[in-house]
Image (cartoon, grey):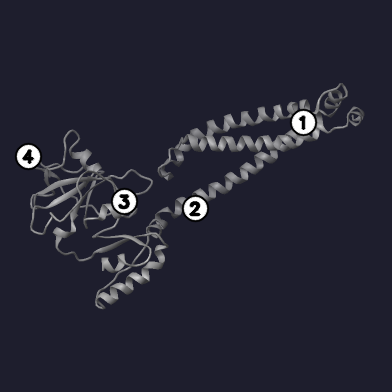
Amino acid sequence: LRERVAALPGVTGTTLAAEVPSPVGRSSLGAEVEIEGRAPQALGGSEDLSTNAVAEDYFRVMRIPLMRGRPFGAQDEPGGPPAIIINDRMARRFWPDADPIGQRVRFGARQAWMTVVGIAGSVKSVSLTQENSSLEYYRSLRQEGSAANVNVVVRTAADPERLGPAIRREASMLDPRLPVGNYFTVESAMARPLALSRFCFTLMLGFAGVALVLAAVGLYGVMSYTVAQRTQEIGVRLALGGAAGDIVALVARRGLVLTLTGLTIGIGAAAGLTRFLQTMLFEISPLDPTTFGGVAVLLAVIGMLACWLPARRAAKIDPIAALRAE
């Protein structure tokens, strides 16, 4: 089936796994960990242990980095010494000052000893917005021999939704009696747990857009009122030989001071309130300098544009009309 699927247009890689990563989490084994030469260690209250049986090229297709050691290979034959690959979180937990490669471990007194042959990067299997607390190890699907359910993982360069029927058709041609379960894309698997976050951020983005428009309109209104109040002063300056550029700079300077004052207060308030958004952010710091800098520049540009029109209008005031105004 892998060979048939790999031959489909747009497929760049295929592999097999008993389970696939999911942001909604996995069930915990709840076993104690025994390292050869050490006393068994029970898991902490916030820790869970999960496992997965995967094919040799699983980490390459899934793009999970193999940080140390080797992947599963032909040497991991059925009946041979069981080999496992642990995630880096498990390596830090049980071997903080030692090399886990080559160590033997088992999970429960009735389990067989397994040799650690590699260390892979951790996969978020609890939540995208929370620190992953799962200790995970991988077994060789070749050594498992058989499994009740196997997932065919397909990486594509095209739209993955269109490949679903083609994969079903290839399975049916291989064996009409072969039961094929549901298929899903990574995007669809992530859609449900991320739906609330996306809705909240869309709502906040809408309010932020309205606030930005109100701020620009308000600044424009303040500057227009200021120009109207200083009509006679501007007329006198122009009558005494003041240049139009000086008038523009005079009006714009006041708007710039207001803009910078508002930015300083706003950035300080935002920095204090971002801790409430921390649980909703994914791989973004609540005090991300790029975000704060980009928003500050955007607001400064909008503020300068809101000041430019009143300043330009002030520079075109007729000095005689301005001096006659009361």
Q: Amino acid at mark 2?
A: Phe
Residue behind mark 4 = 37
Local packing at callout 4 (Cα closer than 10 Å; few below 14, some 14-19, many 20+) is: few
Figure check: 212 above or below 169:
above
> From mark 1 to mark 3, how far is it between C-alphas?
60 Å
Q: Which mark is residue 226?
A: 1
Q: Position of residue 119 (x, y in %)?
A: 22, 44
| Circle 3: residue type | Arg
SS label for mark 4: loop
In-image side of 235 versus 253 (left or right): right
Query: What x and y, as percent, mark residue 215?
Result: 65, 39
- Dot 2 falls on a residue whose secondary structure is helix
- The residue pinned by badge 3 equals 63
Q: Amino acid at mark 1?
A: Thr
The image quarter containing residue 232 is top right
How far apart in space, not on screen, are marks 2 and 4 (Cα)? Answer: 52 Å
Residue 199 tag number: 2
In terms of secondary structure, where does tag 3 sit? loop
| Residue lying furthest top | 240
- From this view, report whether residue 196 is shown above or below residue 230: below
Instruction: Say which of 302 and 110 sits in front.
Output: 302
